[in-house]
Image: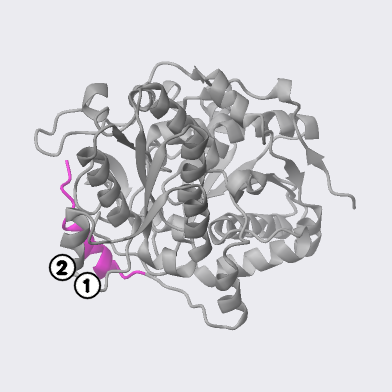
Amino acid sequence: MKQKRFILQENELPTAWYNIQADMPTKPMPPIHPATRQPLGVDDLAHIFPRECCVQELDTEHDFIPIPEEVLDKYSFYRSTPLVRAYALEEALQTPAHIYFKNESVNPLGSHKINSALAQCYYAKQEGTTNVTTETGAGQWGAALAYAARVFDLEAAVYQVKISMQQKPYRSSIMRTFGAAVTGSPSMSTRAGKDIITRDPHHPGSLGTAISEAVELATTTPNCKYTLGSVLNHVGLHQTIIGLEAEKQMAMAGEYPDVVIACFGGGSNFGGIAFPFMRHNLKDGRHTEFIAAEPESCPKLTRGEFRYDFGDEAGYTPLLPMFTLGHTFKPANIHAGGLRYHGAGMIISQLLKDGLMRGVDIPQLESFDAGMLFARTEGIIPAPESSHAIAATIREALKCKQTGEEKVILFNLSGHGLIDMSAYDQYLNGDLMNYKISDADIERTLQGVPGE
């Protein structure tokens, strides 16, 4: 059967991001100062982040926030991204479900991350910033940030999780191609990095360690701001361009999703695809189900606890209300480097508390099984992160096969895996394994969480 692709014209592109905070029945709890335990305002956050991002972070009133013309102009270079009906995958599964995927892998740099990188660098440039810093795991965010910084004539410094830097060296090369300085984390270039290495000389790195180093550099470098690829509210806001497009494209297809799925690290692509559809549950009485697929080895949604915790290992960030495994949690060296984060974003944590979504954990081998099937049916090699969403989609499609239900399933293909082929080599050679964290290890890392 001929594959169907739905693409919007430039004049149909969304012109505003959707801010789900305005419609949430229970607003997210505020970030707080770790010493005073008082809620933080825009001025408190603006010494780290671009000010306009701080305004967006705390905005619980405006449901739509206009996209600046200059950012829209950059979006129009590559958006809209296709919505695709996965007929071949449906046939392979022999499921009555209708499976659609939003293909963010066609974006510059190969993932959805560019959607927020352009916005954050634009706001940094507008306030006169000359330098930006960030962290990255597998490298999709670091690559996007390096490119966006070049677009807006900013100098970029990226701390990449050390184990991911070793697993995916070409993403570091991409960042350097765009002019970014790239350092493996933990490193000896910051006080936070030195302290971590002193405690554990063989620490493989985590997003928590890399965030600590990037925040330290931003706060000790003149005219420098920190940018973030996930977790915080303003990042998810920028990513809603994905779901807003998908809404229009699903209407073109004459269908509406019963289930929306995305992989989950900190929440950027899950929020991006889910929030615009979730507003119809909140406001219009829809009953779409929302599923976030996380690694079995880093299960903050399914096995973490809701606490106030730091967003980084060194404790430089504000305390954030999140489902967490503890900011000192050291994740296993799985190949889905973008999902190796200890906590969930504030909005998503509140939505999970309120029962408006659910999480599922996916073993590493199941994720690669799913990625291989998707590649062999749809012709796209997915990033290991995206393969978690594919695995969750396959689970739901097979349920439909058992029950005979003709559900419509939509998932976000957040990135391609063409720079992750060493991981696929290890899978094909039988050298990958599953990792499952014990209850005792989770209890131990949660002991260091500051709490309320």
Q: Which mark is residue 193?
A: none
Task: Identify the residue shown where x is 30% and y is 49%.
Answer: 211
Q: Residues within 10 Å of mark 1 (few under 14, many from 20)?
A: few
Image quarter of the C terminus: top left
29 on left or right of 422: left
Relative vertical location of residue 394 with respect to residue 248 in this rendering, above or below: below
Q: Nearer the viewer, residue 279 or 103?
A: 103
Relative vertical location of residue 417 with respect to residue 366 in this rendering, above or below: above
Residue 165: in magenta span: no
In contact (CB < 8 Å): disc 2 and disc 1:
yes
Q: Which residues are magenta?
A: 437-452
Q: Residues within 10 Å of mark 2 (few under 14, many from 20)?
A: few
Q: How many marks?
A: 2
Residue 26 visible in rendering = no
Q: Position of residue 236 (x, y in %)?
A: 46, 35
Can you identify the residue that label 2 sits on? 198
Q: Nearer the viewer, residue 18 or 179?
A: 179
Quadrant housing residue 185: bottom left
Q: Position of residue 45 (x, y in %)?
A: 25, 29
Residue 449: in magenta span: yes
Can you identify the residue that label 1 sits on? 201
- Under mark 2, the amino acid is Thr
Q: Residue furthest left?
A: 36
Task: Identify the residue shown where x is 45% and y is 49%.
Answer: 142
Task: Identify the residue shown where x is 73% and y is 34%.
Answer: 250
Quadrant housing residue 7: top right
